[in-house]
Image (cartoon, helix red, strand yellow):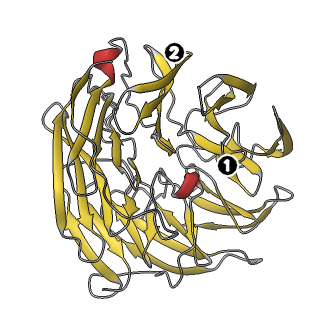
Amino acid sequence: MRPIFALVLIASASPLVAADWPQFKGANGSGVSSEKDLPVKFTDKDGLRWKVPLPARGVSSPVVFGDKVYVTCSAGTRDDRLQLLAFDTATGKKLWQRNIAATGGTTAHPKTCMAAPTPVADDTGIYALFATGDVLACGHDGAVLWVRSLTGDYPTISNQVGMASSPVLYKDKLIVPMDNAGESFLAAIDTQTGKNLWKTERSRDINWVTPVIRELNSTDAEVFYQSQKELVAYDAADGKKKWSHKAGSSSPTPTLVEGLFLTSSDGLSLMKPTENKLEDVWKSAKYRTGYSSPLFYDGKIYAAIPSTGIVYCIDAKTGKAVWDEKVPGKGKQTFSASPVAGDGKIYVLSESGTVAVFKAGGAEAELLGSSEVGEELLATPAISGGAVFIRSDKSLICMGAKK
């Protein structure tokens, strides 16, 4: 391993609390927040806590830890200037920005960019993976802890359409997914040093799925990592493959909630994990979510279908639709962002800039409110501190009452 540079770890920040949204789709990727009194709409004059411009584009999602919200951006004519930024959750004031130069390739589909993976945070710091294979670790005060070039260590890493799988944390391990057309692997990197704790080889294939942690007890856990061919469970302690299941997808990220595993594989599948396999509860080819990941919330599943612009509420026990409703807005609505939930509300963001809020549950669809951002929305929002944090292609927006 060849880190670009490393500094002594500086302890900082507050411990994780219920209000934090520390990774892609929140705590362990559930997409669900315990927050109350969440907003349903906003305008420039009402319901908008703040809106600040971003220095460059990005499709990564915001994450919130303590009193800071973090985003990544990528800039430059070659998209090779990588940025990690911290903002105050109450005011939107930019607190700090750290920049590094890309060491890997920057070719990607025009829809995405090098700031596609979502960062992840805990009390030790904030960790950002970029689609170039560069990893930046910072303390919550902005002090750089270490930087690592994965393409420097593994030069064949390559993805001509762009990488978007996000890292996750388990104890002192930063779990980094690196499926691509070149050397592919799943690695656990020491959060203090940036060095490998373990690295497991994987098949060379393009994949945009984020891993999910399944805690078995206080000391043991599995890393679920899904691809187009299969879902594999790895031991979080050493990275060894434990078992696999032949069903998968390369885009939406699965959800592990209430002892059940919700995934997209030619539609939606709800499965029950046992000791070394997954057992089907139901499957349905009707719900094809594309890039958007499905949501499991309070006994119901919510799926945003990009081909139709329709949001489905599905009974989790049977897989049958309870209701379906088109998202309001101009023109055809489609989705890349994943639905999220909290306070009995479902938040759905369309690519054209609509933020639609539906009432969770119920026998019929009920639109509580909708807002027009006027900018492209590809990133999944974050919920924390009584507010919803939305990242557009130009701005970072806090939807909620002013503090």
Relative image position of residue 349 (x, y in whole percent) = 46, 62
**Nearest the eye: 41 or 10:** 10
**Nearest the eye: 81 or 385:** 385
Quadrant in the rendering for residue 249: top right
Q: Residue at x 21, y 37 (%)?
A: 7
Quadrant in the rendering for residue 41: bottom left
The kind of residue tagged 2 is: Arg
Could you tell me if residue 329 is visible in this image? no
Q: Residue at x 32, y 63 (%)?
A: 69
Relative image position of residue 132 (x, y in whole percent) = 30, 28
The residue to which callout 1 is attached is 218
The residue to which callout 2 is attached is 204
Q: Is residue 376 above or below residue 91?
A: above
Q: Is residue 80 above or below residue 345?
A: above
Relative image position of residue 78 (x, y in whole percent) = 16, 30
Could you tell me if residue 12 is visible in this image? yes
Give the SS element for disc 2. Answer: loop
Point out which mark residue 32 bears. Answer: none
Q: Residue at x 25, y 41 (%)?
A: 145
Q: Is residue 389 above or below residue 286?
A: below
Quadrant housing the N terminus: top left
**Nearest the eye: 136 or 355:** 136
Q: Earlier in the sequence, mark 1 or mark 2?
A: 2
Give the SS element for disc 1. Answer: loop
Quadrant housing the C terminus: bottom left
Mark in front: 1 vs 2: 1
